[in-house]
Image (cartoon, helix red, strand yellow):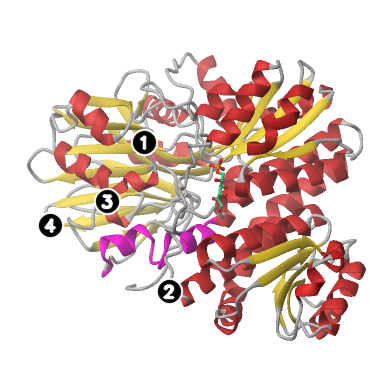
Amino acid sequence: MAFLRLDVSQIMCGIFGCILKSGDVAPLMRQALERLEYRGYDSVGEATVQSNKLFIKKDKGKISEVHAAVNLDDMPGSIGIAHTRWATHGAPSKVNAHPHTDCDNKVAVIHNGIIENFLELREKLEHSSHIFKSRTDSEVVPHLIEEQLRNGSDLLEAVIETVRKLKGAYAIVVLCSSYPDTIVCARKESPLVIGIGKDAVYCASDIPAFLPLTNKALLLEENEVALLTLSKVEITNSETGEVVSRAPFEVTWTRQAAEKSGYDYFMLKEIYEQPQAIRNALRTQRIYYDLVASRIDSADVVYFTGCGTAYHACLAGAYSMAKLAGLRSNVVIASEFNQVHTNLLDKKSIVVALSQSGETMDTLNAVREARARGASIVSVTNVMGSTVTRLSDVYVGQNSGPEIGVAATKTFTAQVTVLTRLAIVLSKKRGRTSSADTENLLEKLAQVPDAITSILKQQDDKVREVARKCKNLPSFCFLGRGISEVTAIEGRLKLLEIAYVPSLAYAAGESKHGFIAMVEPGYPVIFVAPNDETHSKIIGNIMEMKARGAHIISIVEEGDEQIKSISDDFIEMPRGIPGIMTPLAFVVPLQLLAYYVAVEKGHDPDHPRNLAKSVTVE
Ligand code: F6R
């Protein structure tokens, strides 16, 4: 186990549950939450049970702020659950903070993940007179458990029956005042780990939560539910109903290693989180897409704007919308937006702003000016409650969870996913894609995470080998045609910012109008060369570079013998990814290349010099 990398699934909220033989659980829960704060930090909450009564404290803000306001340590009882939130459904607020409770305030639930069918479940529960307090997807869980308990189930049965109704991703931890010695937890797609201490048992979204308390851990697998008491941990598969036996293992990680799930740096961990980040991005309800597509469709003028990697995601999105939906739009770097473009906006204009942080000053300035001219604002962001969400008429959450590495990786692919899905929905709305083709494209998009998983499994070593070979080269050039130009410029940005290698990126066809003068024997040129409509032309571009002695590194589809045979190195991607979706997969080896070149050169990829994660100055 020592240096095994944990399966990095959904990284969003931090969750913790604990039963102590004696003593108050509350101070220990707060300390555990502080160790989980890197997972999410917009609101905090705890629940304990004593004398068959449930106690709850929760509020918006960082743990230290909420603790200063309400004293989280002052809660009775030796059993409790605690949560630090990264909002997906429902803005950060006291009422949306976890734990959520049932109507009778007996069942408290904390949740990490996204419940896709919550609207449908909520509607049914409201019909049977359940009263909801929050706008979260999570709140359906305590009400569903309440229903089961009312029907005579015990707590374990109630949780099993409940999770069988949930679609999406969840790690949930349940506390019930009628069961003062028991915690029940369950998971699907979101991680959950059990810690077994002396006279204590814990469960958490991540090992660091309990690492100072015990190093005996047990991983819950997909669809498992665990009943925790001081005397036993009983695991049941919620699908089959079978009881599972599993021995604990010893954790030999330091806390820092545990936070990175065994990866050397957060950036690598986040690159590996991309399959899950894309799945999460796809969990946003279709109604948001229909709403945004309608607004874009009726606008006279459409702009996309953002900075850095978010700007690249805009380029990819605008390309797909032009190609699939016939949308005419303009893509403008946010810091340039107000020079000319705001003067062209009016009430019939729409500005689609992309910002992972939702706080980038240049993007906010563009959005503010556009709003002042009456334009509608749609934003795609990772931070609910951020300034960009407050300035937007509609916002779509990309649901990537916190990105700690300064270089954007999983948030890029999540943003491109959101815009690709929007392009598909818009195309259907405009009658350019049939229902069957739309479903087929959505299905292909849903398959991209599996393609990325196989790239990570099969190509990581190969990319590392290329990085070792090329680490001392003074410059690189990235070339691509069509949408692959975006992949190329994003790959270049990663290499620049974390490995400090001055590099170029071009539309491959343009390279002969200037860049080619740079090429001399051994100069590394990276071709992003999927097997789409640009394939035959890019072969011509490769030959031009090859004739001048360039070292050709190509990112190609598996079995593309033609390009492989003219490349010095090649990285193979799974076949059959539709052209507009290729940036999602083809960018992955370029992220890895930048990461490995940086590491080989002795740089810290998580903290590139002079860069900040969120640029809040002009
Ligand atoms: C590059 C990178 C930056 C950001 C840019 C915008 O890896 O991280 O270029 O993409 O600063 O940030 P957000 O998306 O927060 O507006």
First reached walking from the N terminus: tag 3 or tag 2: 3
**Which residue was labeled with disc 1?**
110
Which of labels 3 and 2 is toward the front?
A: 2
Q: CA distance from mark 3 to mark 2?
A: 30 Å
Q: Residue type at mark 4: give it.
A: Lys
- Which residue is identified by label 3? 209
Residue 34 position within the rendered picture, expressed as x and y whole percent measured from the top left? 26, 44
Residue 466: % across, % down:
61, 80
Q: Residues within 10 Å of mark 4 (few under 14, many from 20)?
A: few
Q: Earlier in the sequence, mark 1 or mark 2?
A: 1
Q: Is residue 522 above or below residue 352?
A: below
Tell which circle, 4 or 3, labels the residue nearer the N-terminal end.
4
Discs 1/3, front: 3
**Marks 4/3: CA–CA distance:** 16 Å
Q: Which residues are magenta?
A: 252-273
Q: Which residue position is annotated with label 4?
A: 198
* Mark 1 Cα shell of 10 Å, populated few (<14), some (14-19), many (≥20): many
Q: Are marks 3 and 2 in contact (CB under 8 Å)?
A: no
Gap between marks 1 and 3 measured at Cα: 15 Å
As drawn, the residue found furthest toward the left would be 23
Instruction: Name the residue carrying label 2.
Output: 602
Q: Is residue 511 left or right of residue 155?
A: right
Mark 1 or mark 2, whichever is nearer to me: 2
Distance from Cα at disc 4 to Cα at disc 2? 42 Å
Q: Secondary structure at mark 4?
A: loop
Q: Are dots 4 and 2 in contact, CB under 8 Å? A: no
Q: Earlier in the sequence, mark 1 or mark 4?
A: 1
Q: CA distance from mark 1 to mark 4?
A: 25 Å
Q: Quadrant of residue 248?
A: bottom left
